[in-house]
């Protein structure tokens, strides 16, 4: 059973997708002839200092930084996207190697914001 906002990955080619509309029991996501793996939202691990997103005040809203220690942004290891979920609204910034692992969003810092990031090597993280 798929749920809205779940992220799945193909084990063969690293294709990732996010569920926008839940499909109930009828949906089995597959790629390359195999079931796709649901990515768990990690919150703590040995890599916590480099992966858990942190919310700060920004110049025009909120700033999300990835980790207490800056995350690598190299061609083979980088943050693919940073996301802030505010109730039914989703704000996402896609990243590229060489950029800083942070993003600003035009919304007020408030209770209930959910932060997520996706690392191409270590998966989905929530803060």
Image: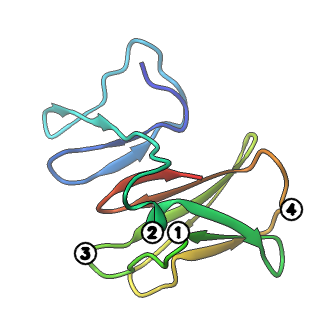
Residue 16's place in the image compared with 119, above or below, is: above
What's the mark number on residue 50?
2
Say which of marks 3 and 1 sits in front: 1
Residue 74 in the figure: left or right of residue 21: left
Label 4's element? loop
First in sequence: mark 4 vs mark 1: 1
Label 3's element? loop
Using a 10 Å C-alpha cutoff, classify the residue at mark 4 as few (fewer than 14 neighbours), some (14 to 19) or many (20 or more): few
What's the mark number on residue 76?
3
Residue 61, given in percent of the width and then of the height, sits at 82, 71
Q: Nearer the viewer, residue 31 or 55?
A: 55
Farthest-out residue, front: 46
Q: Nearer the viewer, residue 106 or 57?
A: 57
Residue 79, given in percent of the width and then of the height, sits at 43, 69
Residue 71 in the figure: left or right of residue 58: left
CB under 8 Å between discs 2 and 1 = yes
The residue shown at (47%, 21%) is: 23
The residue shown at (42%, 78%) is: 96
Residue 112, given in percent of the width and then of the height, sits at 78, 44
Q: CA distance from mark 2 to mark 3?
A: 16 Å
Residue holding disc 4:
108
The residue shown at (49%, 64%) is: 81
First in sequence: mark 3 vs mark 4: 3
First in sequence: mark 2 vs mark 3: 2
Residue 62, given in percent of the width and then of the height, sits at 77, 69
Q: Nearer the viewer, residue 115 or 31?
A: 115
First in sequence: mark 3 vs mark 1: 1
What's the mark number on residue 67?
1
Say which of marks 4 and 1 sits in front: 1
Label 2's element? helix
Q: CA distance from mark 4 to mark 2?
A: 25 Å
First in sequence: mark 4 vs mark 2: 2
């Amino acid at each position: 059973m798929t749920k809205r906002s779940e992220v799945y990955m193909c084990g063969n080619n690293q294709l990732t997708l996010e569920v926008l509309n839940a499909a109930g029991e009828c949906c089995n996501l597959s790629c390359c002839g195999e079931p796709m793996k649901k990515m768990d939202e990690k919150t703590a691990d040995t890599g916590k200092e480099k992966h858990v997103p942190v919310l700060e005040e920004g110049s025009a809203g909120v700033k999300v930084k990835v980790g207490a220690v800056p995350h690598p942004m190299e061609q083979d290891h980088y943050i693919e996207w940073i996301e802030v979920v505010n109730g039914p609204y989703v704000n996402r910034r896609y990243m590229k190697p060489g950029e800083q692992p942070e993003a600003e969003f035009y919304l007020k810092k408030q209770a209930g914001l959910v932060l997520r990031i996706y690392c191409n090597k270590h998966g989905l993280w929530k803060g």
